[in-house]
Image (tube, grey):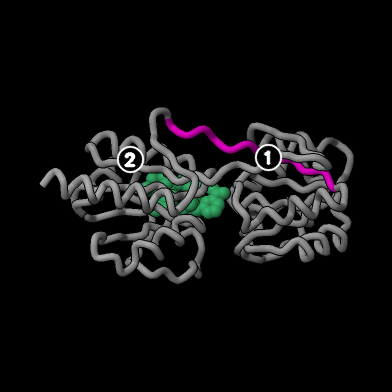
Amino acid sequence: MRVLVLGGTTEASALARMLAGDGRFEATLSLAGRTTRPVAQPIPCRRGGFGGAAGLAAYLEAAGIDCLVDATHPFAAGMTGNAAEAAGRIGVPLLVVRRPAWVAGPGDRWTEVAHMRAAAETLGRTRRRVLLTVGQGELAPFLAAPWHHYVVRAIERPAPGLLPPGSEVITARGPFEEAGERALLAERAIDVLVTKNSGGSATEAKLAAARALGVEVVMVARPELPGGVRAVETAEAAFAWLEDQHAGTLRGS
Ligand code: NAP
């Protein structure tokens, strides 16, 4: 059975490891190509966009894909919308993998906002020391609030034009440990952390560190999934779904 996994996440890489060497599946992993040194993968990889929903539908047909798994990041709403549209258009079964969102607990000082512009506005007019862990594509709203001091953590150094003036850049790729996150918050005297509600354990330690140090968190809510799509929370559940799909094709043949 031919499977296309839309990736760029821990879950997609975990699913790729499960599919590798399993004779029932011929799987390809698709990466957007945003990072120049992506993590090595155990199944064939393709890189770069498809050209919208129409391009993805054409790819699925040309490659004879039987099942599509969208294991992109919870904030990759464009790709997820395209996957739903393309799969619906040509009748390819689609499953979305969405890890659970983080939820505030006792001791957390979160302000939850709907989008990144609201996050920048929430920082207010008084200069604050802000840790931004929002991804290099999401920095634009903070250019409109240049009076804050920003520490920007990203996998790769953002182009200078994307950065608020005077930003300090830290390049690092998770997973991160709580002790290191505490040290970062304390050494840079961070007042407030801005993050997307990505969920997952790889980058969760910053929230525990903020809680421990009483640092405020501005939490940007994730976009809604397209209506009617089937979703699971883990790579294991996605693999089980693929096994069911495979068993279904055997029963149908
Ligand atoms: P996006 O805004 O939803 O996607 C924009 C366009 O990038 C898509 O329309 C598609 O181009 C292309 N694209 C995205 N994911 C792709 C994939 N897996 N394979 C091939 N093309 C893809 O997505 P994004 O937020 O830029 O995320 C890009 C990648 O980084 C995704 O793979 C995502 O899982 C990963 N990532 C994102 C975040 C985040 O915070 N957004 C965090 C960690 C990892 P076409 O329309 O031309 O097909």
Q: Secondary structure at mark 1?
A: loop
* Residue 224 falls inside the magenta stretch: yes
Looking at the picture, how far across and down is residue 118, in whole percent? 70, 33
Earlier along the polypeptide chain: callout 2 or callout 1? 2
Q: Give the magenta-colored segment's residue range.
A: 215-226
Of residues 10 and 34, the one nearer the viewer is 10
Q: Residue at x 77, y 48 (%)?
A: 193
Mark 2: which amino acid?
Answer: Ala
Amino acid carrying label 1: it is: Val
Vertical relation: 59 (above or below) 116: below
The number of discs equals 2
Where is residue 249 shown, x and y percent of the image? 18, 47
The mark found on residue 141 in the picture is: none
The residue lying at 67 percent from left, 66 percent from top is 171
Q: Is mark 2 within 8 Å of ligand 1?
A: yes
**Residue pointed to by mark 1:** 103
Image coordinates for residue 150, horizontal then vertical, percent = 78, 53
